[in-house]
Each structure stands twice: as structure tokens, then as C-alpha cells.
């Protein structure tokens, strides 16, 4: 596949993945602010919808983003310049945020917990900062010499 198509698909997957992270972050933060626990066994349609969206759209987009990113690295014959290493570290962090939000959302939806971690409550802001860093690194490619 042409490098430009790989790059375009990579960006599309990233946009979809980040949209899902922001959606989960908003729901988890709103729930933690309201402190309205879901009763054990009681279903919340919004929480269930976001969980399903995460399972069938957000998580596959993350996997596609990683696969396309690796394909781009191989196609571009990059040996891991410093900017790319930093970008990958930030993306590993974002993947962890995604996992933490997924777990928080599951616990909220099933009524397992009354508290949400500080990281999950602030995931939206952390994601904004991470996106700024990733896009700046990908576009500017500093430290390349």
C-alpha cells in the first residue's frame, strides 16, 4: 500500500480512537462529579452504549492505529529517531489511559466502585496535552538533525 494511504488511514484511526477516549473521559468525569452510583444489577443505557462503542469502535481503532504506525515505520525505514521514540512513549501512555478509562467505565456501569481514580477523572486534559505533543512531534519531527 502507498505510504500516503497508510498515513491517511493512520490519522483516521487516531482521530476515531481519540474521539472514543474523550467520550469515555467525559462520561467517567461526569459520573465522578455527580457521585450517582449505578445500583447493582441496574442498567444505564448511556454507560452501556459507550462501553459498546469502546468495544467495537474505539479499541479496534487503537489497534489499527498501532498496526498502521508500525507499517509506516517499516515503510519509511525509520530506525527510531528521538522524536518518534518520544511519540511512541506518549502513545503508550495514551493506550494506558484508554485501558484505565475502559476499566473505570466497566466498574461504574456494573456498580462495582464508588470512586474513580484521579487519572481517570483528568483523562480528558491529559489526552489533550498528549495529542498536542504527538501532533507536534509528528509534524515538526524535532531532533532529526
Image (cartoon, grey):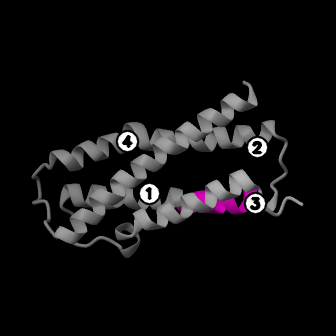
User: Up-down: is 60 above or below 38?
Assistant: above
Q: Which residue is drawn at 38% across and 36% down?
A: 56
On residue 99, the disc is 1
- Indicate whether residue 90 is drawn in magenta: yes
Q: Earlier in the sequence, mark 1 or mark 3?
A: 3
Q: Which of marks 3 and 2 is nearer the N terminus?
A: 2
Q: What element carries label 2?
A: helix
- Of badges 1 and 3, the one in the foreground is 3
Residue 92 seen anywhere in this rendered image of the structure: no
User: Could you give the CA–CA distance between mark 2 and mark 4, rounded to whole angstroms?
Assistant: 27 Å
- Asked if disc 1 and disc 2 are in contact, CB closer than 8 Å, the reply is no
Q: How crowded is mark 1: few (under 14 residues within 10 Å), some or many (20 or more)?
A: some
Q: Is residue 100 left or right of residue 33?
A: right
Q: Which numbered disc covers residue 73?
A: 2
- Circle 4 packing at 10 Å, graded few (<14), some (14-19), many (20+), is few
Q: How many labels does the image show?
A: 4
What range of the chain is rendered magenta? 83-93
Where disc 4 sits, the SS reads helix
Q: Where is residue 98 in the image (x, y as percent from the top left)?
A: 45, 56
Q: Position of residue 92 (x, y in %)?
A: 59, 59
Residue 55's tag is 4
Tell me if residue 80 can be seen: yes
Q: Marks 3 and 2, how far apart in space?
A: 13 Å
**C-beta proximity under 8 Å, tags 4 and 1:** no
Of callouts 1 and 2, which one flags the residue occurring earlier in the amino acid sequence? 2
How far, Cα to Cα, is label 1 from label 3?
24 Å
- Which label's residue is closer to the chain start, 2 or 4? 4
Question: Judging from the image, what secondary structure is the residue with disc 1 in?
Answer: helix
Disc 3 designates what residue? 83
Residue found at x 74% / y 31%: 3
Q: Which of marks 4 and 1 is nearer the N terminus?
A: 4
56 or 82: nearer the viewer: 82
Amino acid at each position: 500500500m502507498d505510504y500516503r494511504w497508510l498515513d491517511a488511514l493512520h490519522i483516521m484511526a487516531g482521530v476515531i480512537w481519540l474521539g472514543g477516549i474523550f467520550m469515555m473521559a467525559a462520561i467517567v468525569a461526569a459520573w465522578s462529579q455527580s457521585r450517582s452510583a449505578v445500583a447493582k444489577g441496574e442498567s444505564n443505557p448511556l454507560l452501556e452504549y459507550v462501553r459498546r462503542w469502546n468495544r467495537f469502535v474505539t479499541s479496534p481503532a487503537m489497534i489499527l492505529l498501532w498496526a498502521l504506525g508500525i507499517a509506516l515505520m517499516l515503510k519509511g525505514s525509520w530506525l527510531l529517531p528521538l522524536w518518534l521514540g518520544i511519540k511512541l512513549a506518549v502513545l503508550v501512555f495514551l493506550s494506558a489511559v484508554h485501558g484505565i478509562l475502559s476499566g473505570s467505565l466497566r466498574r461504574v456501569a456494573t456498580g462495582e466502585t464508588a470512586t474513580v481514580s484521579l487519572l481517570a477523572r483528568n483523562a480528558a486534559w491529559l489526552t489533550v496535552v498528549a495529542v498536542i505533543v504527538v501532533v507536534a512531534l509528528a509534524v515538526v519531527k524535532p531532533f532529526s538533525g
